Image (cartoon, grey):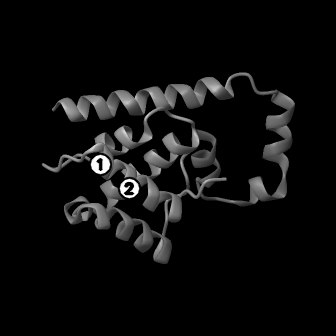
């Protein structure tokens, strides 16, 4: 139960930080961005995901690679593939958002369904995510 509360608190802080960072944006920049053909022609939510720092949900071979990276740390983490993908996307937001102690946050984020990870496990998850879903820019 403590893990769920911690995970919920981390998610709330990340969401608040993402919204807080965007509050100072120039409205002209928003208008210009939304009027570009690329932004207006897509019907998916990838623009919304990028605004929050989340990478787009992986599909096909990319999804398989992300799940394999998580499975390499602990095979029990991918019994619920959607949960593992959601945790991976949220961890990418933490990695790319400059969060402190990302190894610990990965361990907390992926500790679910009776699996408890260490910070070392979190480090390995981060390495796998950097190789798959969210390479360092």
Label 2, residues with CA under 10 Å away: few <14, some 14-19, many ≥20: many
Q: Secondary structure at mark 1?
A: loop
Q: Quadrant of the N terminus?
A: top left
| Residue drawn where x is 52% and y is 58% of the image | 130
Query: Looking at the rendering, which quadrant does residue 104 occupy?
Result: top left
Q: Position of residue 42 (x, y in %)?
A: 69, 60
Q: Secondary structure at mark 2?
A: helix
| Residue drawn where x is 45% and y is 57% of the image | 127
The CA span between labels 1 and 2 is: 9 Å
In front of the other: 89 or 46? 89
In front of the other: 40 or 101? 101
Residue farthest to the bottom, as pictured = 61
| Residue drawn where x is 42% and y is 28% of the image | 12
Residue tagged by mark 2? Answer: 125
Residue farthest to the front, as pictured = 120
Of badges 1 and 2, nearer the viewer stands 2
Residue farthest to the left, as pictured = 114
CB under 8 Å between discs 1 and 2: yes
Label 1, residues with CA under 10 Å away: few <14, some 14-19, many ≥20: many
Disc marking residue 110: 1
Above or below: residue 137 compared with residue 15 = below
Query: Looking at the rendering, which quadrant does residue 79 occupy?
Result: bottom left
């Amino acid at each position: 139960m403590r893990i769920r509360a911690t995970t919920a608190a981390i998610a709330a802080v990340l969401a608040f930080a993402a919204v807080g960072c965007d509050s100072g944006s120039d409205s002209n920049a928003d208008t210009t961005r939304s009027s570009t053909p690329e932004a207006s022609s897509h019907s998916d939510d990838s623009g919304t995901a990028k605004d929050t720092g989340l990478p787009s949900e992986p599909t096909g071979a990319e999804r398989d690679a992300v799940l394999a990276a998580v499975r390499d740390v602990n095979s029990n983490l991918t019994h619920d593939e959607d949960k593992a993908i959601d945790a991976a996307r949220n961890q990418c937001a933490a990695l790319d958002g400059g969060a402190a102690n990302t190894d610990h946050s990965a361990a907390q984020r992926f500790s679910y369904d009776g699996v408890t990870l260490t910070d070392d496990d979190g480090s390995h998850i981060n390495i796998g995510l950097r190789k798959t879903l969210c390479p360092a820019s």
